[in-house]
Image (tube, grey):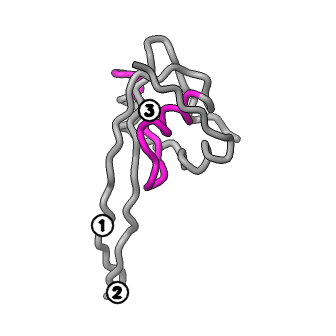
């Protein structure tokens, strides 16, 4: 059962904020063909899947979404907190590739 969601170009960039690049995400790309994106706090799995498929012209097999809670930090005796955000792990079909290190 496939639900093809078509979203506008403006909506794509409000759903997908930025790719997350780290040692862990680079390892995920090599081992299991998964890519990590920072997404909107209101985005759904279907919207993330549609946005990635339309933006990068690839076939997405699965999307896992999780909320990252902000940490409490102190700096020079002042306490503050980092903001909470949301990220998505996007698994691509076999043979599909996204170049997340491309310069705009």
Check disc 3 and report the residue beneath it: 35
- Judged from the image, the secondary structure of the residue bearing numbered disc 2 is strand
Magenta-drawn segment: 29-53
Residue 82: quadrant of the picture: bottom left
Q: Magenta stretch containing residue 15, yes or no?
A: no
Q: Earlier in the sequence, mark 1 or mark 3?
A: 3
Q: Magenta stretch containing residue 35, yes or no?
A: yes
Label 1 to label 3: alpha-carbon separation? 24 Å
Label 1 to label 2: alpha-carbon separation? 14 Å
Are there few (<14), some (14-19), or many (20+) residues within 10 Å of tag 1? few
Query: Looking at the image, which residue is at 35% across and 74% down?
Result: 81
Give residue 95's position: percent from left, percent from top.
48, 11
Are there few (<14), some (14-19), or many (20+) residues within 10 Å of tag 2? few
Check disc 1 and report the residue beneath it: 71
The image quadrant where one finds the C terminus is: top right
Q: Earlier in the sequence, mark 3 or mark 2?
A: 3
Label 3 to label 2: alpha-carbon separation? 36 Å
Residue 72: quadrant of the picture: bottom left
Are there few (<14), some (14-19), or many (20+) residues within 10 Å of tag 3? many
Give residue 12's position: percent from left, percent from top.
60, 42
Q: Are marks 3 and 2 in contact (CB under 8 Å)?
A: no
Give the mark toward the camera: 3 or 2: 3
Query: Looking at the image, which residue is at 54% across and 45% down?
Result: 16
Check disc 2 and report the residue beneath it: 78
- Judged from the image, the secondary structure of the residue bearing numbered disc 1 is loop
Q: Are marks 1 and 3 in contact (CB under 8 Å)?
A: no
19 on left or right of 33: right
């Amino acid at each position: 059962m496939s639900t093809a969601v078509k979203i506008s170009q403006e909506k794509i960039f409000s759903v997908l904020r930025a790719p997350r690049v780290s040692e862990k995400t680079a390892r995920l790309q090599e081992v299991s063909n998964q890519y990590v994106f920072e997404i909107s706090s209101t985005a759904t799995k279907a919207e993330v899947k549609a946005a990635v498929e339309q933006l990068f012209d690839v076939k997405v097999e699965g999307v896992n979404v999780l909320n990252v809670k902000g940490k409490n930090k102190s700096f020079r005796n002042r306490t503050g907190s980092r903001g909470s955000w949301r990220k998505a792990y996007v698994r691509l079909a076999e043979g599909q590739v996204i170049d997340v290190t491309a310069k705009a």
